Amino acid sequence: TDATSLGLAPVGRARLVVVKSPALETGEEIPVDSMPVSIGRGSQNEVPLDGDEFASAEHARFEARRDGVWVEDVGSTNGTFVNGARVTTARRLTNGDIVRVGQTDLKVEL
């Protein structure tokens, strides 16, 4: 399926860029498009953070919706943060936001 068949407006080239991480390469780009992107220490995640001891096995999920790209903490121990503020419910992201998952910082590019 593609974004149109799911009823989503194309978000364009929405992506997360690794700013710093003990588990991922700085500058690595993670596309956020028609499918939700899970991130965490467990190998079942689309973005596994093996080596980030502060990330939970299932930590956060990014999702492209009709009205933008959203992040949601999925019950992590140490929390998910956007620009230093803890995410308590799903939050819409804006261009340039910094999302912290464990010790991994990701810059939002929309």
Image: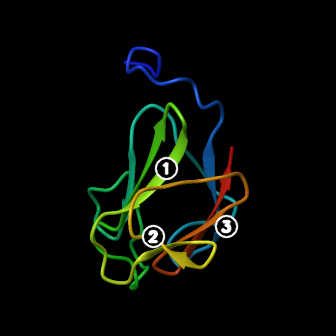
Who's the residue at 41% across and 57% down the image? 90
Q: How far apart are the alpha carbons under marks 2 and 3?
A: 23 Å
Most distant residue in the right direction: 96
The percent coordinates of residue 86 (x first, y second) are 48, 76
Who's the residue at 46% across and 22% down the image? 3
| Residue carrying label 2 | 87
Q: Residues within 10 Å of mark 3 (few under 14, many from 20)?
A: some
Image disc number at residue 80: none
Who's the residue at 61% across and 46% down the image? 15
* Disc 2 residue type (three-letter): Val
Q: Residues within 10 Å of mark 1 (few under 14, many from 20)?
A: some
Q: Residues within 10 Å of mark 2 (few under 14, many from 20)?
A: some
Say above or below: 21 vs 44.
below
Most distant residue in the top direction: 5
Marks 2 and 1, the one that precedes in the sequence: 1
* Disc 3 residue type (three-letter): Thr
Residue 58 in the figure: left or right of residue 89: left
Q: Confirm or deny contact between disc 2 and disc 3 (CB under 8 A).
A: no
Q: Nearer the viewer, mark 2 or mark 3?
A: 2
The one nearer the camera, 43 or 74, is 74
Q: How far apart are the alpha carbons under marks 2 and 1?
A: 11 Å
Image disc number at residue 26: 3
Q: How many marks?
A: 3
Q: Nearer the viewer, mark 1 or mark 3?
A: 1
Instruction: Give the quadrant of the C terminus.
Output: top right
Q: Secondary structure at mark 3?
A: loop
The one nearer the camera, 104 or 10, is 10
Marks 2 and 3, the one that precedes in the sequence: 3
The percent coordinates of residue 102 (x first, y second) are 45, 79
| Residue carrying label 1 | 70
Say above or below: 17 vs 57.
above
The percent coordinates of residue 66 (x first, y second) are 50, 30
